[in-house]
Image (cartoon, rainbow, N blue to C red):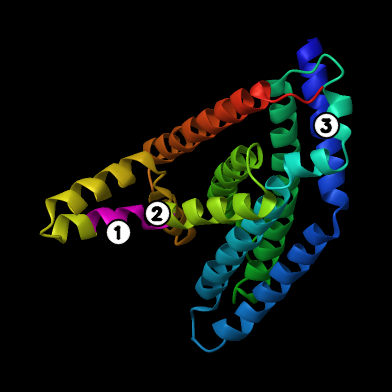
Amino acid sequence: MIAFEKVSAIALNTFRETVRDKIVYAFMLFTFIITLLSLLLGSLSVGQDVRILGDIGLAAISCIGGMVALFAGTNLVYKELERRTIYIIFTKPVSGWQFIAGKFIGLVACVFIVVAAMGLFLALLAWLIHPEHSSSSLVSTIVEIAAPVGLVFLELIFVTALATFFSTFSTPLMSMLFTLSLWLIGHCGDSLRQLGQLSQNPGFAKFSSVVYFLLPDLASLTRVRSLLLYGRQAGSEIIAYITCYVFAYVLVLLVLSSMITERKEFS
């Protein structure tokens, strides 16, 4: 119970600091502008307005939400070191895992608020431009878009955990580069494996297979998200598998982050 109170206190403080950061509102405004521009692009394709809006809107939510997680996550430990508040925190009976868990939960809560706000805005636009929006329900539109947006949020949880991990032992700039690189590679892992299979070099083929199995397969998550966006059945088993798959990586990253933090001397 005491450990929970410590984690919740750190999480609440992290959430307040991140929400107050002007960069969050700047990113949200930018996403809203991108979504509005998608309306113009949708008008260029007759009958495809809603589909183009959904594609661009989800891509914008993923990119901008990822940037929020990236910039805030890579500064989690660095800001505390720079302001020397981390030394005050660890003079109290706070363990490394409690510090990491609190920081991670607080940042995930902030990312959730940002993604939810952008998702609601996207649902409202999709409802307004729909030719039969007067007869359809806004609530039903929100429900339809909730699953794809939820998968975007699931991916951003992984990005947040990745940024948190690198922030424990690297500078913000290097943490940002490492996180961004692995995030992009996670979307290209399957292509790398297929390239290795087509290659006549057995060494490269084996290397590409190892990289594919070690790194998260975010491309599958994107494919399922597209299926849900277009109203196709993705299968509850696949969604459950992807969710467990991502959370397994998140758990490993948080455990490693806690171990690194425990080994540091902040007193």
Label 2 sits on what residue type?
Ala
Q: Report which residue position mark 1 lands on.
A: 191
Q: Position of residue 77 (x, y in %)?
A: 74, 39
Q: Quick one: 127 or 72, which is closer to the camera?
A: 72
Label 1 sits on what residue type?
Ser
* Label 2: which secondary element: helix
Residue positioned 89% across, 26% down in the render: 88
Q: Is residue 76 above or below residue 205?
A: above
Q: Position of residue 15 (x, y in %)?
A: 81, 41
**The C terminus: image quadrant:** top right
Q: Is residue 168 above or below residue 211?
A: above
Contact (CB < 8 A) between labels 3 and 2?
no
Contact (CB < 8 A) between labels 1 and 2?
yes
Q: Is the magenta region chiefly helix, strand or loop?
A: helix
Residue 225 part of the magenta segment: no
Q: Which mark is residue 250?
A: none
* Label 3: which secondary element: helix
**The N terminus: image quadrant:** top right
Q: CA distance from mark 1 to mark 2?
A: 9 Å
* Label 1: which secondary element: helix
Question: How many residues crowd mark 3 within 10 Å: few (<14), some (14–19), many (20+)?
Answer: some
Work out whether residue 134 can be spotted. no
Q: Report which residue position mark 3 lands on.
A: 86
Horizontal side of residue 41 vs 182, given as left or right:
right
Q: Earlier in the sequence, mark 1 or mark 3?
A: 3
Q: Quick one: 73 or 228, which is closer to the camera?
A: 73
Q: Which mark is residue 219?
A: 2
Question: How many residues crowd mark 2 within 10 Å: few (<14), some (14–19), many (20+)?
Answer: some
Residue positioned 72% across, 63% down in the render: 121
